[in-house]
Image (cartoon, rainbow, N blue to C red):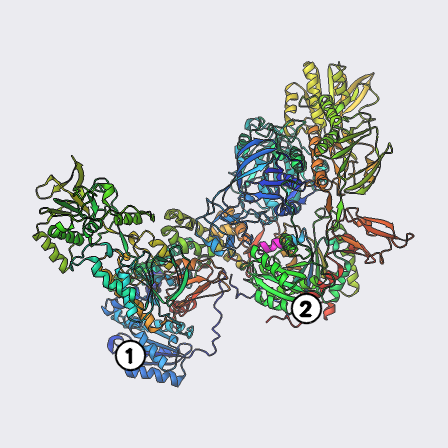
């Protein structure tokens, strides 16, 4: 691997570096992210992961606070339905995120800036695909309204 | 503990899901466990599975936490890559010689980073993926393997020396020799699992010759996200997605000429599951399953089978495949079979052989070394009433080694065997278990945060991409950080000593480690700072390897910037961390067993033998339950004789108090602190509850003239007549699946097929001329019970299959019975005039199940049986801690299965009763009384029923919510739901997470990349 | 037409001569006025061991009709063991050329000592004729051949082949880490099968660089059975060097990952 | 790996190349159209000046180059003329004198490799010259200035082994003023020689001959003696070795030394199971015989038989041990002349014994030496005390031999003298080996008389077996420590048998004496002195300057697989504390083996980078524009 090769996914067209916050549940999606690492699956470096015990721990206030502080995109990743270590947590998350998507629209945020994804401990490649796609979506949407974008 | 010659340790042979469960139960009940596994890492076949039926759970998601727990448990010693050489001594005191083959890697130094394997120039077939992927000569079986230690394959390694050069932890030891251990143990549990039938022994299917004929385990790997095609279903011949897939059942099972007459019990279900998952992966895939009898006999299995048929459109063809041939050009496969009598040929793109389960590879050696008998099929010999005992006292068995079985039954047997192993040496409990001593915890309350940051190189895995010195220097600039350093391996032994030294030297009250994933390493560092006198929760990790350097290898600048952000976020949270202490709950050492059938009695006796005072409550006047009504058992043992023996043992056991004719009126409290008032007014306090209220035979009122014609009997009623010799008739007709697999009872009752076989054979024995008909939909005599089906057929019992839409019609022609039935294959209609019509009616739950469920706050299934915590991995536990479930109350099952479950509940209960206090979870929810107004929105969010609305502390008129620390698992779902923000989760407080969010998005100038 | 072009066409041969023996031999050949054809353009290197398989394959990819490597006789090398390694590497180069379809005879290794002036002239004359008989290098014109040579070049740079060839000598002569000497034939078998595998994998990457390809498509172009191609694709995905495109219909296609992948 | 073209050279200044085409009288001009070649050179990119001279190597040619560099501000110089092997240093010095780094120079050989070999094809030769120059220009464009690294040399020597060659080396170095550490495993100096009787040619006793040397070494102020000690560890490279020396049982102390001389000597081969050794009494090896003579404990003898080539030349060892014939002849003469005063007695009662019983015969010294050869046991044995006794009559000496290696002047004369003293020399061949056996208590030798073609048996009183010198059993450990190779049969392998007999390939380490092969005392001493002078060269200069031709490791690519370290014959690569490879510039010879081997492509060679070689080669393929 020659390290002098320029990374293909450098910052968006006009140097815009998206800021993405990812909430991962400890048992499934965080383990999936780890497996992506163990398998050396490369992906764009503009996301920062925060670990919680269950995706249901993600308080709507966290999402709003992150957008307020300038996040361009937020991804909440939990276990597949029926996989949840705490049995039913992810059902609650699904309902909360659906509600939040409607809410952020009212602040002029494109709902695609908030994304929910089920990722199991064995789905390293799915984590990579999700991060890559989500970064592209945010690149297309450009900076968040809070940072002067659309 | 009394002075005893017993040894307080157990050896578990075989590290699959069965061995794992036994080891965890025993280690949590005060015994030292030696888990011996012949492969380099534990996990067995289940670790190879993608999803598991019937819940479609990802096998790795539910198994990984158990693997990590076993790997780190201070009472479990893993001895992998090892075999049993010699066993001598007797029950209670064995001396076992174990030979451990050389890893050629030092397990204490290897961090599992994998740099060696990346550079090893030798490639070979990867057995974990059944040869469909490549692995190197130095390898680990799979990424989540426990112990995560690489080992060198002696045949393949050419000794070039690159791996030891690449290993910066200097862990490779080429001259490592084989080790021999001599271990004293009290009991042994053998659970070596099974060997998959070698499909090459059925040449007519072309396995190994035609590329597109694969075995079920190979197909399972194909489905798995860590499999060869990352989860895509592709034809091995040319990589195309197969449109038509054929599953051929009973390959190497129910088959005389390859010597396996038994049914392997699980192949029908895993084929249905694989068909469903294949459909999910590739929408255009059309699976067809060729079977003789579709044996979906387990809990919720039939529902799963119906969803496969109706929801997923999977085609089921009842026919045995004669032969498979290949079209050389397209590599498609042509299947020859008969359907409704006429021969057919059909082309498929892929064929999956549902291979059966044969005895474990080392069954011979184990039985020779440990001197226990194998049955004539080569599996371990067990008895109906001794399902987890081998013929050698002190040596117990669980899992597929005694008979082919699915995971729920395996896990139950594993806990059952653990119970038996525990009883054997109960006098030596706790003698060999070490309790870790920690120095007095420093009081850091009120102190200003003094944070120590340790940034790891992990050899070159982090240091090769992220500029570690730069990250360390940056960490020093952050507020609150008083010390920062970099290490080659922060998780190494010497680094732990350094950390403890620095905590002392710089009076640190927070520690942040920037290295790899907290999932595997957080407990290690928490333990280290605890040894330095710091509360374990004053610790935070930043994952700058698996989620930074490894996935941004070609952008060192961006990776370094991200690493700094992650370190800044971890430090931001660490500033707000507070010491948390794990609350302890005292445990009342008594147990309540509800239900005095074979299950209840077995559980009560076993608990008593482990020193527990048991209250056995039975609503009837006498003990014995359903066992009294069975009269015959397929194996020929006499049920009444066992009832009497059990009753005698219960009476003799002074630890057991029997309450006949009583029921439980009210049960309050939680694990360790239950208080129950019985119907006779007595009040008993106990720590655990075992629900064994059994089930009852369904009385099919109004069906097939039951209740209207005296000659129409249920199976148990008929068996009673047989017992009393009242059955005099010449012609008998049995009708199967009465009240089962239809309507709101979609599931199979599991036992009636075998019951009918026993009764039919008894009739034929008494009068060979009698004509006996069995009208059935599927004959589900699974496992070794297949031989009863064969025996009945050989004795002239006639079997007529009817379609579930066209059930037989019974009419009363002047007091004589007339049964009309259309045979499914031929469409011919038969008219029978039996003297007796026997209805094999299903098993239904007890009536009083509805009253007990709310008392214990435990859920029920649609059919009214109790719903366990997890169908696969916690079959006898409830989600609510301290309440356990066994026998027919869980669902229809055979006597030996009930006994296994009964023993399982004992083992599960002992993990609680063996302790005087229970340590609750640290990161539990907590309520701020001032904000909570008792609206109760949070209560339904808690699956563990840990929240309750109680009178407000300060003002009894008002209400508030109380968190039961014993039950709370720390998931935080309630915290997210609380509108008033009154609830919070210790260790993951809102302010802490918000601080991380702010740190992540900070636009500080300082950290732009130099 | 062939003869005509044959007449004007003069083989272009690149020579790599080691400073201490073959270059000195060439000098002596000059001093002794031995005549030989002008087709060879010699490049001086300190030792024949300086020439890695990548250099030779890159030059043949650039259209050279022949490459002549000169070195000291075994045992004479100024750097003691340099030419032992050259010998092993030329074996790898020839295997890779065979795989790619370029005649291995276009590459020739000769030991020429400082005193063998005449021998040098004979070698150049003979090799020029040998290349003339082979005709002009078809690499520039034949796109398929060019991609195969490019694949051979990439394969020559994989960690696996360079590590195996690099350590072959010590494993056979001094012994491996278990202090036993490997049987040369056995080690050759391991290296040859590794060479074939790495070549086919590099060719898959080369072919799937420009546009996504299916397994069957690759099988036809490479004349390799499709199940073997699929096994290679599995190995390449494990090393994260190729990714599956979203399949429409029943045939998934694969595209080389340009930035990612590691050895 | 997807290979991207080397990014454009963004040197601070663009290359400005000067080309100097030489006619070399008519040697080039006669067969190549030099003017058109020079004109063509002007058309090449980045060439700012091109000219031709009659003799570029002559003074005017050189001054032309100097002027052109100054006038046209050239930063690359190409001379197209004869062979770089002879003239490159000359032109490089010229460039340096004009202020241009000498590595920015390229040589194009259009004489030996062009004009002289294509005399009859002038136009093809001219076209080839143009191609060669185009190649040179392509290479020159990518050249980078290099600095030649200087490495200090610690002016302190280390000599391992206190035998004659070791002592000579130490003494010579010490005389030159260099402090020397002399490490000797035994308790005293002298090695193999001190146990011998008298020495041939000088006829004086061994001990006397080497006593002055031992005294000089022991007394010499520059020599630090380490007796009963051995070298435990060696780190570093030429001029900068850190050597750990530990006395037996004591703890290791580190010393800084610049060069190392290995003089660990050899041992005598023990002929187990040959010719009745250790089976019959009075069968001894040559050295044991010399010890008996020195200690005057010879039994009463009437007839002695020497058997040559016992265990050498294919019998056990493959080689001829060079010195045993001359030592045997010396002893034959010795015994023939003054046998009487070497008599001794073995029994307490003072009677002369004619047979030395097998277990009694060996004096304590012989037993101790045998123990040392067979393993390191140190248990002592009772010492036979020494008694003097009277004469007996003349003695018959026979030397059974395959060939008599009495090479050189003195040895031939000694050989003739022996024959004059009626020492019989019987030749035997491999297919008729002499047989030694006991018959009615009398030692007998059967041999095949070559001329009479029949077998004869003769009674003898003693058989002396001439066995070869063999390498020290623990030479392997020292070779691993110093990373120097072992050659045939375990002796050390010198850099070049002819031209560098006392050097190792690895600079800074030298070898002398029997540890690199059998040698007699004269040769061992000569080699000792030679090794000392070789070691003195770098120590006297004080520094070592290597041509700026070495490998360079790219830290970000190297993962520390260690293959480069395996292939480097000079031990010029090692791993730093982070486990990444680093080059010892002083030790690196620039052969490029590691560069071509590196599986990560992390090693490039200064001045011979892949890019330069490829540019040069591909320039040849370009059609002449």
Q: Badge 1: how crowded within 10 Å, few (<14), some, or many (20+)?
A: many
Q: Badge 2: how crowded within 10 Å, few (<14), some, or many (20+)?
A: some
| B763 is higher (above) or lower (below) than C216 | above
Q: Is residue B762 left or right of residue D558?
A: right
Q: Please state the extent of the stretch shown in magenta in the rendering.
A: A34-43
Q: Position of residue B314 (x, y in %)?
A: 67, 39
Q: Quadrant of residue B795?
A: top right
CA–CA distance in space, label 1 to label 2: 70 Å
Q: Does residue B167 appear in this view?
A: yes
Q: Quadrant of the N terminus of chain B?
A: top right
- As for residue B361 lying within the magenta part, the answer is no
Q: Which residue is at the far right?
A: B957
Residue bearing the label numbered 2: B479
Q: Quadrant of residue B677?
A: top right
State the residue in front, D351 or D494.
D351
Q: Position of residue B247 (x, y in %)?
A: 61, 37
Residue bearing the label numbered 1: D57
Chain to which mark 2 belongs: B
Secondary structure beneath disc 2? loop
Secondary structure beneath disc 1? loop
């Amino acid at each position: 691997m020659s390290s002098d090769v320029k990374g293909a996914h450098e910052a968006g067209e006009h140097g815009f570096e998206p800021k993405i916050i990812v909430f991962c549940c400890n048992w499934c999606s965080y383990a999936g992210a780890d497996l992506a690492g163990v398998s050396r699956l490369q992906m764009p470096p503009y996301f920062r992961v925060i670990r919680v015990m269950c995706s249901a721990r993600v308080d709507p206030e966290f999402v709003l606070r992150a957008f307020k502080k300038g996040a361009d995109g937020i991804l909440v990743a939990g276990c597949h339905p029926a996989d949840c270590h705490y049995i039913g947590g992810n059902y609650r998350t699904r309902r909360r995120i659906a509600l939040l998507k409607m809410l952020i629209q009212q602040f002029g945020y494109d709902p695609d800036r908030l994304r929910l994804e089920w990722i199991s401990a064995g789905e390293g490649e799915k984590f990579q695909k999700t991060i890559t796609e989500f970064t592209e979506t945010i690149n297309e949407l450009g900076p968040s309204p809070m940072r002067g974008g659309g | 503990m009394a002075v005893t010659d017993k040894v307080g340790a157990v050896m578990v042979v075989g590290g699959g899901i069965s061995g794992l469960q036994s080891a965890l139960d025993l280690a949590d009940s005060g015994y030292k466990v030696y888990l011996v596994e012949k492969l380099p890492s534990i996990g067995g076949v289940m670790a190879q599975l993608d999803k598991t039926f019937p819940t479609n759970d990802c096998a790795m998601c539910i198994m990984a936490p158990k693997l990590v727990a076993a790997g780190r448990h201070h009472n479990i010693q893993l001895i992998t890559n090892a075999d049993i050489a010699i066993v001598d001594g007797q029950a209670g005191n064995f001396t076992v010689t174990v030979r451990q083959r050389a890893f050629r890697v030092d397990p204490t130094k290897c961090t599992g980073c994998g740099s060696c394997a990346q550079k090893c120039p030798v490639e070979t077939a990867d057995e974990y993926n059944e040869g469909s992927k490549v692995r190197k000569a130095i390898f680990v079986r799979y990424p989540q393997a426990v112990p995560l230690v690489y080992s060198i394959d002696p045949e393949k390694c050419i000794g070039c020396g690159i791996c030891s050069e690449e290993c910066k932890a200097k862990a490779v030891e080429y001259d490592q020799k084989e080790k021999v251990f001599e271990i004293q143990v009290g009991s042994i549990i053998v659970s070596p699992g099974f060997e998959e039938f070698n499909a090459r022994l059925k040449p007519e299917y072309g396995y190994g010759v035609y590329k597109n004929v694969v075995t079920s385990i190979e197909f399972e790997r194909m489905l798995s996200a860590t499999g060869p095609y990352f989860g895509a279903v592709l034809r091995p011949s040319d990589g195309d997605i197969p449109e038509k897939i054929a599953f051929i059942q009973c390959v190497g099972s129910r088959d005389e000429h390859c010597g396996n007459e038994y049914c392997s019990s699980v192949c029908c279900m895993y084929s249905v599951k694989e068909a469903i998952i294949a459909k999910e992966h590739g929408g255009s895939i059309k699976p067809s399953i060729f079977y003789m009898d579709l044996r979906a006999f387990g809990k919720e299995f039939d529902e799963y089978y119906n969803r496969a048929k109706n929801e997923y459109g999977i085609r089921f063809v009842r026919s045995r495949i004669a032969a498979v041939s290949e079209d050389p050009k397209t590599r498609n496969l042509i299947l020859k079979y008969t359907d409704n009598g006429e021969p057919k040929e059909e082309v498929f793109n892929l064929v999956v052989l549902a291979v059966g389960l044969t005895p474990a590879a080392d069954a011979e050696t184990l039985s020779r070394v440990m001197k226990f008998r194998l049955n004539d099929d080569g599996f371990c010999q067990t008895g109906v009433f001794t399902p987890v005992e081998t013929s050698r006292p002190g040596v117990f068995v669980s899992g597929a080694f005694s008979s082919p079985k699915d995971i729920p039954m395996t896990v139950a047997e594993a806990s059952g065997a653990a119970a038996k192993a525990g009883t054997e040496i109960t006098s030596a409990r706790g003698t060999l278990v070490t309790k870790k001593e920690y120095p007095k915890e420093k009081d850091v309350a009120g102190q200003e945060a003094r944070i120590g940051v340790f940034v790891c190189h992990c050899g070159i895995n982090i240091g090769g991409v992220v500029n570690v010195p730069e990250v360390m220097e940056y960490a020093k600039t952050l507020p609150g950080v008083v010390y920062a350093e970099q290490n080659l391996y922060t998780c190494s032994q010497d680094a732990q000593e350094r950390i403890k030294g620095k905590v002392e030297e710089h009076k640190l009250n927070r520690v942040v480690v920037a290295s790899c994933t907290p999932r595997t390493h957080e407990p290690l560092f928490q333990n280290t700072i605890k040894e330095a006198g710091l509360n374990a929760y004053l610790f935070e990790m930043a994952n700058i390897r698996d989620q930074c350097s490894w996935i941004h290898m070609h952008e060192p600048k961006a990776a370094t910037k991200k690493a700094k952000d992650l370190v800044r976020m971890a430090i931001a949270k660490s500033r707000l961390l507070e010491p948390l202490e794990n609350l302890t709950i005292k445990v009342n050492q008594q147990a309540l067993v509800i239900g005095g059938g074979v299950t209840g009695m077995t559980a009560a006796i076993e608990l008593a033998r482990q020193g527990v005072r048991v209250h056995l409550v039975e609503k009837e006047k006498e003990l014995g339950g359903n066992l009294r009504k069975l009269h015959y058992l397929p194996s020929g043992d006499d049920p009444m004789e066992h009832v009497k023996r059990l009753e005698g043992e219960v009476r003799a056991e002074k630890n057991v108090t029997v309450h006949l004719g009583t029921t439980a009126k009210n049960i309050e409290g939680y694990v360790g602190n239950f208080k129950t008032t019985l119907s006779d007014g007595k009040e008993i306090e106990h720590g655990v509850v075992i629900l064994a209220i059994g089930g009852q035979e369904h009385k099919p009122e109004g069906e097939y003239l039951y209740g209207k014609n005296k000659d129409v009997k249920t199976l148990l009623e008929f068996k009673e007549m047989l017992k009393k010799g009242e059955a005099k008739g010449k012609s008998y007709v049995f009708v199967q699946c009465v009240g089962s697999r239809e309507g709101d009872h979609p599931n199979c009752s599991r036992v009636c097929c075998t019951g009918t076989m026993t009764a039919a054979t008894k009739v034929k024995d008494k009068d060979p001329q009698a004509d006996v008909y069995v009208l059935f939909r599927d004959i589900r005599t699974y496992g070794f019970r297949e031989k009863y089906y064969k025996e009945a057929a050989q004795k002239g019992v006639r079997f007529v299959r009817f379609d579930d839409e066209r059930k037989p019609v019974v009419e009363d022609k002047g007091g004589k019975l007339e049964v009309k039935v259309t045979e499914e294959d031929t469409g011919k209609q038969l008219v029978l005039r039996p003297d007796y019509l026997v209805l094999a009616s299903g098993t239904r739950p007890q009536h009083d199940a509805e009253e007990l469920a709310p008392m214990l706050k435990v859920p029920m299934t649609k059919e009214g049986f109790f719903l366990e915590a997890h169908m696969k991995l916690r079959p006898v536990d409830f989600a609510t801690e301290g309440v356990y479930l066994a026998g027919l109350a869980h669902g229809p099952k055979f006597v030996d299965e009930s006994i296994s479950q009964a023993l399982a509940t004992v083992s599960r209960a002992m993990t609680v009763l063996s302790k005087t206090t229970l340590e609750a979870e640290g990161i539990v929810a907590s309520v701020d009384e001032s904000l909570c107004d008792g609206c109760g929105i949070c209560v339904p969010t808690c699956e563990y029923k840990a929240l309750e609305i109680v009178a407000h502390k300060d003002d009894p008129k008002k209400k508030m919510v109380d968190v039961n620390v014993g039950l709370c698992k720390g998931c935080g779902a309630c915290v997210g739901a609380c509108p008033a923000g009154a609830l919070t989760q210790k260790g993951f407080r809102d302010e802490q997470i918000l601080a991380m969010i702010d740190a992540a998005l900070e636009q500080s100038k300082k950290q732009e990349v130099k | 037409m062939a003869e005509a072009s044959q007449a004007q066409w003069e083989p272009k041969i690149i020579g790599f001569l080691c400073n201490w023996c073959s270059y000195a031999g060439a000098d002596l050949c000059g001093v002794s006025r031995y005549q030989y054809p002008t087709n060879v353009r010699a490049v001086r290197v300190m030792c024949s061991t300086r020439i890695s398989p990548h250099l030779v394959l890159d030059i043949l990819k650039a259209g050279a009709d022949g490459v002549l490597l000169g070195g000291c006789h075994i045992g004479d090398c100024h750097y003691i063991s340099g030419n032992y390694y050259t010998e092993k590497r030329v074996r790898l180069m020839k295997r890779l050329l065979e795989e790619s379809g370029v005649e291995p005879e276009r590459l020739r290794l000769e030991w020429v000592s400082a005193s063998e002036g005449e021998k040098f002239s004979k070698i150049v004359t003979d090799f020029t004729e040998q290349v003339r008989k082979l005709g002009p290098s078809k690499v520039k014109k034949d796109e398929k051949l060019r991609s195969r040579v490019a694949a051979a070049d990439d394969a020559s740079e994989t960690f696996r082949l360079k590590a195996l060839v690099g350590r072959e000598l010590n494993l056979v002569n001094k012994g491996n880490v278990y202090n036993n000497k490997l049987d040369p034939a056995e080690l050759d078998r391991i290296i040859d099968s590794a060479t074939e595998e790495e070549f086919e994998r590099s060719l898959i990457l080369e072919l799937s660089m420009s546009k996504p390809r299916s397994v069957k498509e690759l099988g036809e172009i490479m004349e390799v059975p499709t199940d073997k191609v699929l096994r290679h694709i599995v190995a390449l995905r494990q090393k994260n060097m190729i990714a599956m495109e979203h399949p429409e219909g029943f045939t998934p296609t694969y595209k080389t990952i340009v930035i990612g992948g590691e050895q | 790996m997807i290979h991207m073209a080397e990014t454009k050279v963004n040197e601070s200044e663009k290359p400005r190349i000067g080309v100097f085409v030489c006619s070399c009288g008519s040697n080039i001009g006669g067969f190549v159209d030099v003017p058109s070649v020079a004109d063509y050179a002007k058309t090449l990119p980045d060439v700012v000046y091109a000219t031709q001279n009659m003799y570029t190597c002559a003074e005017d040619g050189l001054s032309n180059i100097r002027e052109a560099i100054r006038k046209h501000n050239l930063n690359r110089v190409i001379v197209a003329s004869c062979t770089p092997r002879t003239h490159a240093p000359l032109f490089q010095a010229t460039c340096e004198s004009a202020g241009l780094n000498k590595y920015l120079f390229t040589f194009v050989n259009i004489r030996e490799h062009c004009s002289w070999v294509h005399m009859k094809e002038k136009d093809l030769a001219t076209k080839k010259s143009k191609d060669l120059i185009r190649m040179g220009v392509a290479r020159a464009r990518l050249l980078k200035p290099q600095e030649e690294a200087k490495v200090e040399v610690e002016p302190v020597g280390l000599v391992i082994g206190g035998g004659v060659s070791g002592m000579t080396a130490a003494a010579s170095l010490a005389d030159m003023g260099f402090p020397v550490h002399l490490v000797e495993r035994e308790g005293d100096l002298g090695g193999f020689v001190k146990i011998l009787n008298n020495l041939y040619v000088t006829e004086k006793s061994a001990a006397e001959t080497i006593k002055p040397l031992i005294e000089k070494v022991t007394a010499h102020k520059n020599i630090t003696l380490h007796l009963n000690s051995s070298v435990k560890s060696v780190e570093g490279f030429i001029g900068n070795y850190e050597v750990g020396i530990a006395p037996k049982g004591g703890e290791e102390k580190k010393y800084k030394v610049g060069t190392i001389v290995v003089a660990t000597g050899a041992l005598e081969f023990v002929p187990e199971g040959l010719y009745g050794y250790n089976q019959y009494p009075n069968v001894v090896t040559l050295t044991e015989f010399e010890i008996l003579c020195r200690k005057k404990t010879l039994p009463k003898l009437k007839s002695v038989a020497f058997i040559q080539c016992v265990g050498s030349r294919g019998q056990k060892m493959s080689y001829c041990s060079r010195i045993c014939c001359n030592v045997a002849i010396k002893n034959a003469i010795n015994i023939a002349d003054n046998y009487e005063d070497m008599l001794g007695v073995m029994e307490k009662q003072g009677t002369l014994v004619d047979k030395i019983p097998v277990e009694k015969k060996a004096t304590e010294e012989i037993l101790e030496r045998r123990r040392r050869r067979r393993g390191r046991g140190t248990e002592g044995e009772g010492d036979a005390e020494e008694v003097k006794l009277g004469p007996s009559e003349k003695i018959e000496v026979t030397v059974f031999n395959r060939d008599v290696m009495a090479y050189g002047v003195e040895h031939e004369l000694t050989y003739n003298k022996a024959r004059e003293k009626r020492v019989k020399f019987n030749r035997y061949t491999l297919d008729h080996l002499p047989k030694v056996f006991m018959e009615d208590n009398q030692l007998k030798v059967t041999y095949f008389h070559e001329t009479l073609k029949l077998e004869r048996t003769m009674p003898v009183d003693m058989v002396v077996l001439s066995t070869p010198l063999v390498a020290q059993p623990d030479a392997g450990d020292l070779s691993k420590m110093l990373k120097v190779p072992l050659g045939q049969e375990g002796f050390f392998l010198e850099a070049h048998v002819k031209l560098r007999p006392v050097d190792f390939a690895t600079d800074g380490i030298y070898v002398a004496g029997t540890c690199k092969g059998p040698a007699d005392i004269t040769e061992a001493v000569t080699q000792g002195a030679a090794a000392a002078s070789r070691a003195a060269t770098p120590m006297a200069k004080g520094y070592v300057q290597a041509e700026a031709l070495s490998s360079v490791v790219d830290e970000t690519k190297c993962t520390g697989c260690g293959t480069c370290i395996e292939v480097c014959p000079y031990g010029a690569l090692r791993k730093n504390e982070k486990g990444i490879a680093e080059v010892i510039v002083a030790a690196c010879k620039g052969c490029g083996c590691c560069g071509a081997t590196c599986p990560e492509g992390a090693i490039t060679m200064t001045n011979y980078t892949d890019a330069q070689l490829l540019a040069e080669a591909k320039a040849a393929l370009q059609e002449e524009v």
